Image (tube, rainbow, N blue to C red):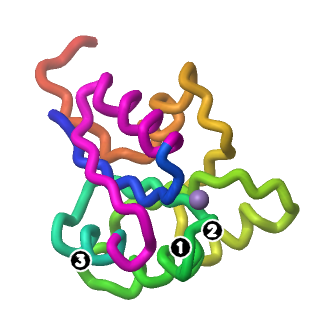
């Protein structure tokens, strides 16, 4: 099974790296470069997971997360905040806005995919390996 991941990120290099890593692991990646188009894409495609940059122009990631939680279509979709903010209270703010997880930039290519996989729905197990 291949999950659909929506990446809302305004920085081209971060978008490129995250997309590269996720596609390399077989995920389908949709990308939006600002909050409004991210909300629209999330509502129309209902991805399995949303990776959300917090520092976005016009509408920041906290606002986007709150918007995602208000729309019936995306209310249950896991959201992982991806941010370079290092200020204390950021993590709490992200969770309060509706995020399920939090990853700090810079993206570490060795651990990024494993970190986000924890928030994807568990694939159904075929056969019993025990
Ligand atoms: Mn940004």
What is the CA distance from the residue labelled 2 to the residue labelled 3? 19 Å
Q: Please tell me which residue is depicted at 53% across the width and 35% down the height of the picture.
A: 115
What kind of secondary structure does the magenta stretch mostly adopt?
helix
Q: Please tell me which residue is depicted at 35% across the width and 69% down the height of the picture.
A: 38
Residue where numbered disc 1 is placed: 98
Q: Please tell me which residue is depicted at 85% across the width and 61% down the height of the picture.
A: 87
Q: Quadrant of residue 32?
A: bottom left
Identify the disc placed on residue 75: none
- Give the image location of residue 99, x and y in percent: 54, 65
Camera-side residue: 38 or 95? 38
SS state under label 1:
loop
Q: Quadrant of residue 90?
A: bottom right
Residue where numbered disc 3 is placed: 73
What is the CA distance from the residue labelled 2 to the residue labelled 1? 5 Å
Q: Is residue 44 magenta?
A: no
SS state under label 2:
helix
The magenta region covers 13-37
């Amino acid at each position: 099974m291949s999950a659909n991941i929506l990446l809302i990120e305004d920085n081209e290099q971060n978008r490129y790296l995250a997309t590269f890593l996720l596609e390399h692991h077989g995920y389908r990646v949709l990308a939006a470069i600002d909050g409004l188009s991210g909300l629209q894409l999330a509502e129309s495609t209902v991805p399995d997971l949303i990776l959300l940059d917090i520092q976005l122009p016009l509408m920041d990631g906290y606002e986007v997360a709150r918007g995602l939680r208000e729309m019936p279509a995306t209310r249950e979709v896991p959201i992982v905040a991806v941010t370079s903010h290092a200020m204390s209270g950021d993590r709490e703010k992200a969770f309060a806005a509706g995020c399920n997880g939090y990853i700090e930039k810079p993206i570490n290519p060795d651990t990024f995919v494993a970190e986000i996989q924890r928030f994807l729905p568990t694939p159904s197990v075929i056969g019993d390996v025990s």
